[in-house]
């Protein structure tokens, strides 16, 4: 399944049939039997699943590797707003944005940005981890913005 609409269509065309579904929980897969139940008040079948098929957010690119066009962003995972679970990325897009407002951080409170999204795709996103999101950059890079990145052995604690 790749969309909530696809799940809804399959459930409502099931002819009262049970489904065997495979669910990934953490790193393990489990198989369950799913029995849809008809809801007369809503005129459709229900199964008690919460399906979220998309998300959008604002994040800055942390690094870009020009040797293989890979990128990383955020430094933290993308989590579901309701469950706080890390969301799996099947396929995603990085798009250009225009910053419309900047909220500075204060003691104990992170800053944030408000942006307008464009339709200009600049990369693809494929992995969401505890340390951020990763993918590939698909457009020309402004070389004036390149900065060297320290190796882990070169990093020292102290003021930035």
Image (cartoon, grey):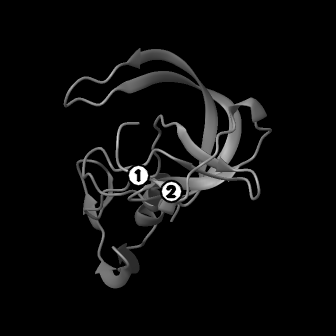
Measured in 3D between alpha carbons, the distance from the residue under mark 1 to the one under mark 2, in whole angstroms, is: 7 Å
The reply to whether dot 1 and dot 2 touch (C-beta < 8 Å) is yes
Q: Residue at x 51, y 65 (%)?
A: 1
Q: Which mark is residue 154?
A: 2
> Does 128 sit left or right of 94 as displayed?
left
Q: Decide if residue 142 is in sight here.
A: no
Say which mark, if any, is on residue 156: 1
Outermost residue toward the right?
Answer: 140
x 30%, y 44%: residue: 81
For label 2, count other residues whose C-alpha is less than 10 Å away and answer few (under 14), some (14-19) or many (20+). Answer: few
Rendering coords of residue 3 (x, y %): 50, 55
Q: At numbered mark 2, what does the secondary structure look like: helix, strand or loop?
A: helix
> x, y (%) of residue 5?
48, 53
Residue 21, by quadrant, is bottom left
Q: Residue furthest left?
A: 108
Residue visible at 34% across and 43% down in the picture: 158
């Amino acid at each position: 399944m790749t969309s909530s609409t696809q799940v809804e269509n399959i459930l409502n065309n099931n002819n009262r049939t049970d489904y065997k579904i495979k669910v990934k929980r953490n790193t393990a897969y489990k198989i369950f039997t799913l029995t849809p139940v008809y809801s007369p008040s809503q005129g459709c079948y229900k199964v008690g699943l919460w399906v979220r098929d998309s998300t959008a957010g604002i994040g800055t690119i942390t690094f870009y590797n020009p040797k293989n066009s890979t990128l990383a962003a955020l430094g933290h995972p993308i989590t579901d707003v309701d469950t706080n679970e890390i969301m799996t990325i099947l396929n995603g897009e990085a798009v250009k944005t225009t910053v419309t407002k900047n909220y500075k951080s204060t003691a104990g409170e992170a800053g944030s940005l408000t942006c307008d999204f464009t339709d200009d795709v600049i990369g693809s996103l494929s992995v969401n981890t505890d340390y951020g999101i990763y993918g590939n950059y698909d457009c020309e890079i402004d070389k004036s913005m390149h900065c060297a990145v320290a190796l882990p052995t070169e990093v020292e604690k102290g003021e930035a």
